[in-house]
Structure formats: structure tokens, C-alpha cells
Amino acid sequence: MRTPRRHEHTPPAGPGATEPRAPHRPRAARRARGGALFASALVLVTAATGLSAQAVPALPVTALPESARHEAAPPETAQQVADQSEIGRATTTAVQDQAQAADLTNPIRSNGADPWLEYWDGYYYLSTTTWDSTVIMRRATTLAGLKTAPDTVVWNDAGVANRCCSHWAPEFHRIGGTWYLMYTSGNSQTNLDGQKLRVLRSTGPTPMGPYEFMGTPLPNQWNIDGTYLEHDGRLYLVWSEWNGPNQTVRIARMSNPWTVATNGYTIAQPSHAWETIGSRVNEAPAVLQRNGRTFMTYSASSCNTPDYKLGLLTLTGSDPLRAASWTKSSQPVLQRGNGVYGPGHNGFFTSPDGTEDWLVYHGNTTASQGCGNTRQTRVQRITWNSDGTPRFGTPVPSGQVMTPPSGE
């Protein structure tokens, strides 16, 4: 039996492999930076609270232990306690705001393969492949803030035999006023033949859940990289599946977000030379809609190569289930460049004010890194051509400062 898509999701090498660590910063430099952040925050505090500079206590960078502070502190009046509490709250907020206001640069996450990102109700939410039994998510009020936001486990399949392992490619979508989360998982960390799509439904108001398990839409075959298409009042499931020598993009209509109602139909398979480097692959579909038009990106070629890239389908017919309704662009729309290799497996999100479209995807920093945990989450703005088609441009280089999404 073919070992399906083993090239695309190679677990991190070695049992002890971990997420890359941040460069070590000398202790003195860390303290100096902390002192500078605190000093900047105090300026914000005086504006936020109306207190004078003299009212703000002069605190050392290295504070005394809690017990020593209590012993050394003189008695305080109730008003002084209230003032100190107000200063503390404002200082904490100011420091958080200043950290979130850091420059927006790529990458926004290391070990960030197969990213999905949405802006909702004041927060950006990001989820990526974990390789294990969990689905994780982080959130921040700015796009740059996602770099340092903590991860939260929003779902864990540990102990559930048929879906315990190798969690990939989470996506969360708001459908009919409810958040649904779809991911790929299987029954083994090493044998990937059992990978299938799974669907969760949120019982809470945000993408963070909590979630309940709803079902496996395609229980009888290998299938990965699921996404949703809403078109003319109908809901469709789009995914990737092997068909002979080709990994293809397929589609079926749904009766609800976890139940397929029709047969599946292939709408894209490798047909250009640039889709067959390393392996014959069309996978990871993602829908982009604007001004009544529907586009769908997909990732082509093997992600074990630096030539993994994005292709584009355009819905030009009336029935999304028919391959003839989709027109494939003859050239890739995003490929390696500017020190970024294998850019692919993307999603789309909008700016806080809804005026801009943005791309999230993963990429490597060398040509030899392949499909493991070296892939980083990256973002950049999409623009639009005069004919109404999307313009993706080239990958934004690492470290280049970008203007944050409109409305931040």
C-alpha cells in the first residue's frame, strides 16, 4: 500500500525534538530592556491615570522579595493603597500594550506549519500543526502580538484510539453564527495511512471553544487538509485525497458542517510541470471570495522540496461540484523567493476594519529543510489586480517591517 502524504507532514526528527529556542540574551541585557520597557510604561501611565510623575513610585529593576517589601514599607492610608492599585493596573496594561505594539515582521511563529488565522471580535487567533494528540490556539490583539502569545490546548484526542495521533492542519470557520474547527488526525504517530478529517463544534462565543466532537465526514478513505466553501446558500467540503499517482483536490456538498451529502468529485489534479516537483501534489485548498467571485488556492509539488508553492483555481461556472466550473491558472501565484523556500499551505484573513485581505502561510529559511518543524508561520497583505483577481506578490523577507493590518 502507498504510504500516503508521508512527504507532506514529517514529524520532528528524533524523540526529543523540540521547538527551536530563541537566541540567548545576556541577563544584563534582559534587565536593561525590562527597565526601559517599565520606564516607557510609566510615561503611558501618567497620561492614562492623570497622576503626576511624583505620584509614581520609583521602583528598582531588581525588586526586593515580597516579605522584605512588607517589612520595609511604612503604613499606608486607604487612598495610597487605592492609588497604588490604580498605578499597578495601568502599568500592567501599558506594558502589555507596548509589547503588542512591536514591529510586524516575519516570521510570526516558529514551528508553525499549516497555519490558520482569523480576526474576530478584537483578537487575532492562530492555530498550527502540532504532530501530536492536540489542537492548539493562541490569540493577541495585534498581529505582531501573536509572536509571544501563549498557546492554549483547545482539544485533546489522547486516548481516543482512532484519532489519537498526528494532528495536522487545523482550521476554524464561523458558519451560521457558530465556530467549527476541522483538523486531520489518525491512529498512529508513524503510520499515516489512517489520516482523516475530524470536525468539532464550539459551545462558546470565540474560536477558543470549548469544543465538542461532531464527527468524521469521510470515514471510509484517507483524506486530509479540509476546508469549507459557502456558495449560493450551500455548504461544501473541500479536501485532498490520493487518486492513483496524483494527490488531488476534491469537493462534496454538505448537509451540515460535519456531514457530507453527495459523492466527492475531483476538481484539481497536477497538470503543470511546476505541480509535480518531488511528487504529483495538489493539496491544502483555501477559499478566497471578493465582490461575488470565488477563488481557491492550493499547494503544489512536494513540501520536501523548496518548490512547494501556491496555485490558483477560479470558479467560472455555476456548479462547484463540476471540474469544468473551475479554471486553473497556468502559473503559480506564490513561490520561493527572498530567502523563503517552499511557501504554501495557506489561509486568508481580513484586517480588523475589513478593508484588507491578508495571507497566512508557512515557509522554510533554507532549501533543504523540507516538511518538518522548521516551517515558520508567515503573513503578508494581498492586493488586487484591475481584473478583480488576487495579487500575491513574492514572499516578504524575514525581518522586513510591514505595515500592520488596517484598523489595528
Image (cartoon, rainbow, N blue to C red):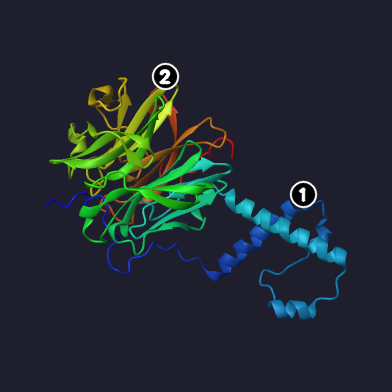
> Any mark on residue 219, and which?
none
Q: What secondary structure is marked by label 2? A: loop
- Discs 1, 2 touching: Cβ within 8 Å: no
Q: Is residue 362 left or right of residue 329?
A: right
Q: What secondary structure is marked by label 1? A: helix
Q: Which residue is located at x 81 percent, y 57 percent? A: 53
Q: Is residue 208 left or right of residue 194?
A: right
The residue that disc 1 covers is 47
Q: Nearer the viewer, residue 242 or 374?
A: 242
Q: Position of residue 148 (x, y in %)?
A: 51, 56
Q: Is residue 330 left or right of residue 2?
A: right
Q: Position of residue 195 (x, y in %)?
A: 26, 52
* First-in-chain label (1 vs 2): 1
Q: Which residue is located at x 27 percent, y 22 percent? A: 325
- Asked whether residue 120 is in view, the answer is yes
Q: Position of residue 104 (x, y in %)?
A: 51, 45
Q: Position of residue 249 (x, y in %)?
A: 25, 36
User: Of the residues shown, which amino acid type is indicated by label 2?
Assistant: Ser
User: Of the residues shown, which amino acid type is indicated by label 1?
Assistant: Ala
Q: Nearer the viewer, residue 271 or 385?
A: 271
- Asked whether residue 170 is in view, the answer is no
> Any mark on residue 386, and which?
2
Q: Which residue is located at x 36 percent, y 65 percent? A: 18
Q: Is residue 197 left or right of residue 28?
A: left
